[in-house]
Image: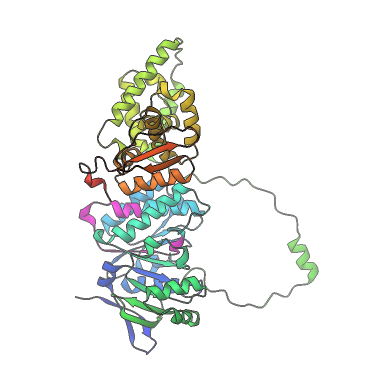
Amino acid sequence: MTVAIEMGHTTAGAPAALDLEELLATRLLVQGNSGSGKSHLLRRLLEQSAPWVQQTIIDPEGDFVALCDRFGHLVIDAEEHTERGLQSAGERARIHRVSTVLNLEGLDAENQMRRAAAFLGGLFEVARDHWYPMLVVVDEAQLFAPAVAGEVSDEARKLSLGAMTNLMCRGRKRGLAGIIATQRLAKLAKNVAAEASNFLMGRTFLDIDMARAADLLGMERRQAEAFRDLERGQFMALGPALSRRPLGLRIGPTETQARNGTPRLMPLPEAALEDARAIILAAPPPETVRPQRRSSPDLLDQLMAAKSAALEIRPEVVEPPISAEDLTERRQRVDRVLRAVLAQPDAGFRVIGVLYQEFVVRCRIEGLASVVPDLQEFRRMLTRARAGLGSDMAGDDAWQDVSVRASILPEDMQGVFMMIARAAKEGWPCPSDAAIARAYGSHSLRRARRLLTYIEEQGLIVCQLDGLGRRIVTLVELAWATAPGDPNAEEAEQGSLAV
């Protein structure tokens, strides 16, 4: 049975229907400037489809919390939960098939991105047995999948963009139908927007956005200016769930309203100038220190707190001083432990936190608890180890210079640069794409090649090919050069690495 929900009327007056089952398979992109009626359109779609399919809304402004009173959605105030808690909430929402509104109001941009990514991750990573159909509506999608880096940290942007990419690119097989709305197509990451097959384009004024909207709808560029003339609530529709040809439609009324309605003109209050002066320029109230709301702690935080408390009450034990020879011997043993951790087949593709946990456990088993490095030092050791360096080589003056140069790069690229530097210093063949990908923690040979290009663009290396197509990498200023190496070596054995 085909489920068609009524979105409103076409410009000719006929009912405008949306095929809900087709929408679940093909996703939807909504675009329009502020005030064009995007939120009203999303509200109409959610209200009409609520009886038929589970829903979740990523709501940055708290516009959709009213759905809980009329349609039974669970409102989750993201400000009151940790990222781990929100990931669990996303998993449980799918398992128990509860429609939700993730209210991100009150958080800054970076925390909105982090918490939205955690919640979407929970929806995405749930077990196959719970891949029920679900509409996932993301309002103001350009905040969560920006086309260019903004003021937020690179880590937060990667988390959020990765979650949005998973939703739009891989979500269909998991029953997730992404519906994303944005004010500016130019601000939305292209790989996210490109996965939608249905489009509803509202009023917009900038040439670049009009041109992209016209291209998506298959209209000629000279027709793009029609988007300037659309009224509030009017959209041009195209897609298998809507219409096979561009179709103008007007969105129908909704049963619920946003908490913040459209501002209305009101007469100013009548007040004497002196009264206004007394009110506006009165002494400010005394400052009060507001107690900070404590977020619910994670289980890991509780365990760490208990461990710290136990250490504080433990009687202090004075250890005898360690001689330089013993300290060197212990560091060598720590290096061996690290090499054993990295020798595991999947070690190159595991997150640092997991590797560090296993490293600490192995050190304690070896009786090295007193010299276990902290996480920051472990990151530096991991970078050196992936480059094939031990503690003794890292202390060499030449390698100090290499480390300074490596610090120009992002942390996850430094190990690759140092691996190439060691091959150049020893005169070994240039590492293959497969070896570079493993050192970077990736399965992608293309990513390895892009990584070399990036390092070269930073002015640290020069890449060349000899007459046989073998790669030679030379370090700038140090003049160390690798021997010629086949970039495709190991590709036959590891063909699965190619993407």
Question: Is residue 204 positioned above or below 467 on the image?
Answer: below
Q: Position of residue 278 (x, y in %)?
A: 77, 63
Q: Which residues are magenta?
A: 120-142
Q: Nearer the viewer, residue 382 or 397?
A: 397
Q: Quadrant of the image for the N terminus?
A: bottom left
From the viewer's side, name the closer residue of 224 and 152.
Answer: 224
Where, by quadrant of the figure, is residue 393 drawn?
A: top left
Task: Answer with the quarter of the image where residue 19 lies.
Answer: bottom left
- Image position of 496 with respect to 220: above or below: above
Task: Find out whether residue 140 is within the magenta segment.
Answer: yes
Q: Position of residue 315 (x, y in %)?
A: 45, 16
Instruction: Check the image and name the residue furthest to the right.
Output: 274
Say whether residue 351 is visible.
Answer: yes
Q: Position of residue 275 (x, y in %)?
A: 77, 67
Residue 395: say if magenta: no
Residue pictured at 40% horizontal, 19% vertical: 370
